[in-house]
Structures are given as structure tokens and as C-alpha cells.
Image (cartoon, rainbow, N blue to C red):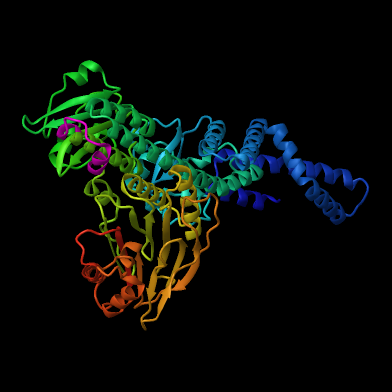
Amino acid sequence: MNLITFLSKFGQNSGGKLKVKKVFETVFIYGVALFLFLIFDLLLNQFTDSVIFTFTLTIFILLIFQPYLIHWLKKLFLRRSYLLATKAQRLLEKLNSDLNKATYFDEVTGLLFKTFDALFLEQPYIFYILEDDKYYPAHYHNVFDEELLAFDLKSEYLAGISLNSLFVSQLSKTKLPSEFIEQAKRAELVHLLPFQGHNQIFAMLLINAQKIPFLGEREAWKIFEKIQRKAGLILENTALIVDLKNRNYQVHKLLEVGQKILSSFDIKQILDFILQTLRKVAHYDAAAIFLFDERSGEIKNINYDGYPAHVIENLHLKVGEGSIGWVVQNKTLDVIDDVRKADHYYCLRDATRSQCSIPLIFDDKVLGVICLESDRLSYFNQQMVEMLQLFSQMAAIAIHNANQFKILLEKQALEHELINASQIQKALLVQRFPRVGGLSISAVNIPSKIVSGDLYDVIKYDETTVGLAIGDVSGKGAPAAITMALVLAGLRSQRQFFMTTCDVIYRLNNLLYESSLEGNYVSFFYALVSTQKNCVIFTNAGHNPPIILRKDDHVERMKDGGIVLGFQPNINFKQKEFEFNAGDIILMYTDGITEAMNEQEEEFGEERLIEVLKKNRHLSVYELRQKIIQEVQQFSNKKEYEDDMTLVLCKYE
């Protein structure tokens, strides 16, 4: 490798900005090499008078031994740089080898953080990992600016960076906020090293690359780039496993809370149990549950953990006071990423940096507030807030039951009151349907009892792709409703990843098999609809085959996939692709529609359903949905339905 090539490689690795020290080291090495060349030239001239022969032979020998000469000269004259580069190469080689063996998210991050701290011993850096469409500072070193660490960095800020890019020399080339870039520059963090995931940048290293000890060392840098290419993928894969396990654990804890509510009317005992459970799933630093007395207008603490006793016990809040009072007044949750910047935050702990307050609402009345605090900035992300909302609904039901019932009721009657469709299931099911390309989407779920075992979901992935899901849980009552929540949670935990439909079904099947009771199964259908490719890719896990009504009234049924979910683990499901063009309609339904019976015990049936669809295809999806339900109701002529009814309609305008 000649001088020009070496400097070229050197410059690329540093983002085009060479450090003066590195330039002098390079010139020094080549100066020594030139000096040796002159000595060699003089020695050869003693045996031959041909200058050209001597020069050619010398160049030839020098080119052969040049890499060894440079290595030896660096080791001899630039010992410190040589030792740093050698140490860095050893660390990176070990990290590269260890990553191939790592299987858990904490194991992968631990290897990365330990190696980075050793590589960048004296310099600051921040390592970000993607979670819920935001990059959070998973690890940082020699960075003391809390405001810089607290920035809300959305995934869209890096959307313009190619997945093949391994170095961003100027932060201004990204969509990162200018305020963040300025603060990063003040902390000498001026370069970005992306770690690519499957279809997005999953992690990134914010650092000053010019100060990296092994900058310009070709072999060490080549290993680092190899780590960049695979570490992001490994992090993304292991993070998905962690997320599924967390969801599974959270559902189990919800089941425990539900059982506790069923077995006790002692409100303090129940709320204490909820706090204990939240500590395990949310890992808060302090938490309290407050009850609102509508007659006096006071907000009184009932349970607390992590606060000084004398502070919390003497606390008397009114509506509108502090974050708790604000939540009661506005009937909405309040997430504060940095309490030092919140005007309505009431300080109870000096160490608190972020807070989440969630109202306990039953029948549109605020019964109280769950308040959690963390010593970390921006601790409460979207996924955690969704989980806390489920626990708050349980707590609201517990408070309502304790207030309303003074004597024990039969367990079945309490279960009937416990899981209220308007409180839990309507909150879980999508009510506002996204607009994707030319697609119009609508759905409805009508439970036969108070709770439903049917489910549907609509997930927008981008401006041209939407995921459609429908399912039917075996059984009735609370177990079916909780299984329905588990399936939805498992499906939504995968929404940030563009996976094949058969992979999604495979993961849901294993999650359900491990988490649900024996004999509790789910028929399920999942499809990805793309207006860019004009196609629908689907997997049917034992569900009623959805219908595609073509523009010319031809009907196709989406049958392929596999067996119902939760029956056996590690089942390989199939997926299939159909064309889906303008004028086509997808109709997904549960058997409560087709098996609705009239007085003669005749079923409504699939043929009647298709006929209604054909006759009313000119209607909007909402009107068409209403028309189908109306036809089923008129056919059965019953006030109560024997089974839940669910419809999902998708029309390509």
C-alpha cells in the first residue's frame, strides 16, 4: 500500500478529516522508509554501474517488504500509537467473536458497553438504541450533560441515512434537531456511527471519531465496521425476544391482579398488591396511589412506596395542584420526561427526574391516580405507558368494586362486573382507522355478553402498507377476554418490525402456547396489504377464510396458513400472496356472523354474506359494515346474540 492509498484509506475512516498528529506519524514512517531506500541504493551501486537496474531492484524489494517495514517502524518509533492500535484490534477481535455466541439482549449490550468503555477510555460517547420509534441513551461515558441525554430523538430523524452508511461525518446531514446538534458539539460529540437493523438504523454511536485511538488503522477499523454491520441486527433480534418475554410477564401479572381482585374486597390490600406488581414490571424508584374524594374535592394518598413517610403522609392536594391534581382535573394521563422543566410538577423527591401519572377512571369518573417516578430522564416510554394503563384499569375496577359492594358476591357475578367491555376491551381495540394509500378501513366488534373473545387490529407500517388481523378465542368470559388481550399485546409488540406474516403467526403461536391455559385456543388471520405492490400477503391460522371481492364480482377466499394458535409449539405456518387492485374489497369476519340463526335454526351462512357484500359494494366501508350487521340482525331477529360478531372491511378505492 503506497502513501497515497494509505492516506486515502486513512481519510475515509475519519470522515475526511485527518488529525495533524496522525499526518505527522504517517509522513515520519515514509521518511524513514525513504532513508532506508537511499542506504540500500548506495550499497547496490558498489556492485553495478546501472542506476536504473539498482533503482528498479530496490523499488521491487521495498514494495515486497513495505508492510513489514511500516509495521516494524511503527513499533520502533511510534510505540504508543502502535500499542493503542494493537490493544484496540485485540478488543475488537474478541468482541466480534463474543457477539457470535451471544443470545440475550443484556448479554449483547454488556459486551458492547464493556468494549466501548475500554476502547474510548478517555473520551465521551453516547450509545443509543431504538425503542418504540425513539432512540434512548442506553449507555454513555464521560458525558455529564443531562439535557443532552434527555433529548427526544425520534427514529424519523435518521430516516434519510442509508442502511449501508457506517459513518456520518456531519450531524447536520441528518434530521436531528439543531438544538441537539449544538449541544452535542459542545460535548465534542460530532460524528455518528450507525448500527443497521433489518430495515432501519437500530442503534447509533455518537462520538468524536477524530479522537478514536485506532483511527486510520486499517485492520482495526475493518473489524469495527464488521461489528457495526452485525451488532445492530443482533440487538434488534434479541430485543424482540426480550419484548415478547416482557409482554408475556406483564400479562401473567395482569392475571394475578385479576385473581386478587376476584378474591378480595379490601381496597388497601388490593392496591398494595398492584404497587408490588408494578415494581416488578415497571422498576420505578417511587410510586403512590391517590384516591379522589368527589365530595370534599381532596386527593388523598392510600398507598406509597419509595417516598419519605413524613412527606407523603402530610400531603393534601386539591384538584389542579401538582401533576396528580392536573390529571384529576383533565381526566388524562401525564408523562413528564424532565420534572425540572414542568410547571405543574409537585416535588416530593429530590432524585426524581421523570414522572408518569395515570388516572383511575370508571364510568367516566376519576376515582384516583397512580403516580410513578424514576431517577432517570425520559424513563416512561410508550410501551410502558400502555402497560400502566392496563394496570390502572384494573385498579379502577378494584376501587369501584370496593366502593360499591360491601358484602361478598358470587365469583361469577363479580367477574361479570370486573371486566367491563367499555373499560378494557374498547380501549384495546382500534377505534380510529388509519388512511393508507387508497385504502378505506373499518371494523366492528359486538360482544354477545359483556366481554368478548373476538379481536381485530389494524397496524399502519408506512404510507403504503397496513397490517390487518382478526381472531376468535375459544371459550367465554374473563379467560377469553384476557387471552384476547394477550394476543393483541403480542401482535403489537412486533409492530415496529416488518416481518413476514408467517413469522408473526409463528411467534404469536409460541407466546400463546406458553402463556395461556390448556384448551384455550385462538383462530387467527393476519394479512399485510400493500398499495405500492398491489398485493395482499396473508397467513390463516384456522380462521374463517376472509373474502376478496374483485371488481368484476369474482370471489376468492384466503384459506392457506395452518392450525389454530396455542395448540402446539413451533408450528411452521405458510403464507400466500394475492393480487389486490383498485375496486377490490377484503371482508374478514368471525363465525358469529355466518352462524347467526333464525327461528327455524337456519344459519345466515357465507353465501348470504357474499350476496350482501356484492349488492352494497358501492357503499363506504362504514356504511357497508352497518348494512351487514343490520342484515344479520334482521335475519336472526334476536335481542341477544349467541356468539360475538366481528367484521373488518378494507376497500381499495
- Tell me: residue 278, above or below residue 465: above
Can residue 323 be seen here? The reply is no
Image point (58%, 36%), residue name:
213
The span shown in magenta is: 402-417
- Tell me: residue 541, above or below residue 150: below
- Tell me: residue 298, above or below residue 591: above
Which of the 4 quarters of the picture holds residue 315?
top left
User: Which is nearer the eye, 604 or 493?
Assistant: 604
> In this image, 119 relative to 353: left or right?
right
Can residue 498 be seen here? The reply is yes
Which residue of the protein is positioned furthest toward the front in this rendering?
Answer: 600
> In this image, 351 relative to 326: left or right?
right
User: Which is nearer the eye, 637 or 580?
Assistant: 637
> In this image, 99 relative to 579: left or right?
right
Q: How many labels does the image show?
A: 0
Image point (66%, 52%), residue name:
5
> In this image, 381 relative to 162: left or right?
left
Question: How far across and down, in percent of the image, does residue 156 sit?
Answer: 38, 53
